[in-house]
Image: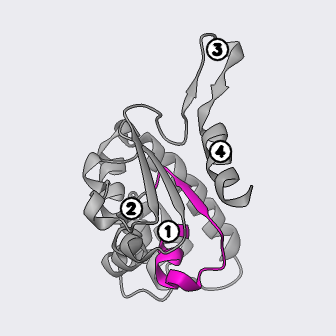
Amino acid sequence: MLLKWLGEQGSQASLTAAAAVSVPFELNKVAVHIEKSLGGFYQWWLLRHLKRTYQIKFKEKPGPVSLAELPKLKTFHTFDNKITAPLHDFVDVDDYYQRASSRQFLSHIRIPTLIIHALDDPFMCPTIVPTPAELSNTIHMELTQQGGHVGFVSGRWPWQAEYWLETRIMQYFQTYLG
């Protein structure tokens, strides 16, 4: 959301610098990848949470689907098509995924922006990573071989973890906010 907003705002963005980590640059590809990877566990777990939230919100008022229909929504694609897209005034899931994805906005970002992404992120497929030609000259992309999804934890011993991500982001911001 941040990268999309920055691209839409261009030089009018009211930030000095920004950072984004483990970005799902193309929502449609990420939804398909998650559905096929990790045995669908993450999709099942998150959908369970989303359905509970929906039940609470629409217990007393009508929503895009009836509460009886919720068990039929078994993928992000079906949930987003029946619930997310209508609730946010998108035509359908394809319209939502296309318009809400950030990849097409990256070339329009005008403030210094750090993007950190790991190639071994289990929730992302490698094809979502933008090419250097798609990035504006204000974006500094750090693509790592390892790091997982918003992980980037290392260290010799589990009880003495080193949190590289937090350190790296603070270093970046100190350059602009110093």
The residue shown at (66%, 79%) is 14
Give whichever of discs 4 and 1 has the lower sequence position.
1
Q: Amino acid at mark 3?
A: Pro
Q: Viewer-nearest of labels 4 and 2?
A: 4
Q: Amino acid at mark 2?
A: Phe
Question: Seen in the image, is 18 located left or right of residue 123?
Answer: right
Give the distance between the C-alpha atoms of the residues marked 3 and 4, in whole angstroms.
Answer: 24 Å
Q: Amino acid at mark 1?
A: Leu
Label 2: which residue? 25
Give the distance between the C-alpha atoms of the residues marked 4 and 2, in whole angstroms.
Answer: 24 Å
Q: Viewer-nearest of labels 3 and 4?
A: 4
The residue shown at (30%, 66%) is 134
| Res. 1 in view | no
Give the distance between the C-alpha atoms of the residues marked 4 and 1, in whole angstroms.
Answer: 20 Å
Give the distance between the C-alpha atoms of the residues marked 3 and 1, in whole angstroms.
Answer: 33 Å
Residue 88 location in percent, x, y?
A: 52, 84
Residue 5 included in the magenta stretch of the image:
yes
Give the distance between the C-alpha atoms of the residues marked 2 and 1, in whole angstroms.
Answer: 9 Å
- The answer to the question of whether label 2 and label 3 lie on touching residues, with beta carbons closer than 8 A, is no
Dividing the picture into quarters, in which one does residue 62 lie?
bottom right
Residue 39 location in percent, x, y?
A: 35, 37
Which mark is on residue 171? 4
Label 1: which residue? 3
- The answer to the question of whether label 2 and label 1 lie on touching residues, with beta carbons closer than 8 A, is yes
Label 3: which residue? 158
Residue 69 location in percent, x, y?
A: 46, 70
Question: Seen in the image, is 14 located left or right of residue 76?
Answer: right
Q: Secondary structure at mark 3?
A: helix
- The answer to the question of whether label 4 and label 1 lie on touching residues, with beta carbons closer than 8 A, is no
Q: Secondary structure at mark 1?
A: helix
Residues in magenta, as a range: 1-23
Q: Amino acid at mark 4?
A: Gln
